[in-house]
Image (tube, helix red, strand yellow):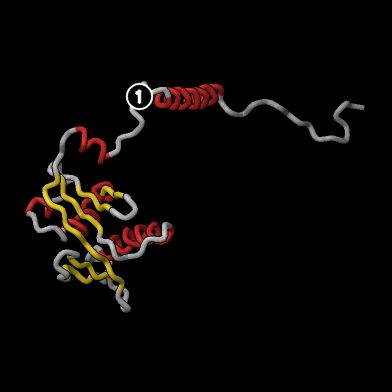
Amino acid sequence: MSPHHGSLVHDHENTVPRPALILAGALVATTLALTALVRVGVLEREAVPAVARARDNVAALEVRHLAFEDRADGAVVVKDADTGSTLAAMIGENDGGGFVRGVMRGMARERKMKGIGPAAPFELTQWENGSLSLRDPATRRSIELGSFGATNRAAFAKFLSGAKAKGNQA
């Protein structure tokens, strides 16, 4: 009788190619090494746009204080918080309303979690290096709008009066 009679033959041979295992190990080792270098200060921790702008003395070209309101029909009404004038009533996706609504829901959620009401305006800033940011002074959260692409950036850039803001800079 054979030693394998009545049982299935079981093979423990590794089916993953050795070079793939070596590359995976090297990737893990590299990740751990880079993390350690950041932790001990050899490598810069992260590229924070606000920190980079401060380091490079990048000035604000224009700052506009904005208030956002939801309307019953689903539109987002954007107002200049300093003058009270309505800048836009965005209802659809074609006018950038979907992106604006999404960003503002995230900002409002953070305010709600911190027990902050909707009264304080947001700051939309066009920087001289071409970047565009939306900051909530109440929570100190800031969003770099250029990182979402030119179309989404333009959804906010149209609320600025400066000619430079109209372009598709990062």
Outermost bottom residue:
72
Residue ID at (35%, 24%) = 43
Q: Position of residue 63 (x, y in %)?
A: 16, 53
Q: Position of residue 84 (x, y in %)?
A: 17, 70
Q: Position of residue 108 (x, y in %)?
A: 36, 61
Q: Quadrant of the C terminus?
A: top left
Secondary element type, mark 1: loop
* Identity, as a three-letter code, of the amino acid under mark 1: Leu
Residue 116 is left or right of residue 126, and the answer is: right
Residue ID at (31%, 72%) = 70
Task: Between residue 115 and residue 131, name the one nearer to us.
Answer: 115
Q: Quadrant of the N terminus?
A: top right
Residue 45 is left or right of residue 121, and the answer is: right
Q: Position of residue 51 (x, y in %)?
A: 26, 37
Reply above or below: 80 against 26. below
Label 1 Cα neighbours within 10 Å, binned few <14 / some 14-19 / many ≥20? few
Residue 127 is left or right of residue 2, and the answer is: left
Q: Quadrant of residue 92?
A: bottom left
Q: Quadrant of residue 67?
A: bottom left
Q: Which residue is mark 1?
A: 43
Residue 58 is left or right of residue 92, and the answer is: left
Reply above or below: 128 against 87. above
Residue ID at (58%, 28%) = 16
Reply above or below: 151 against 31. below
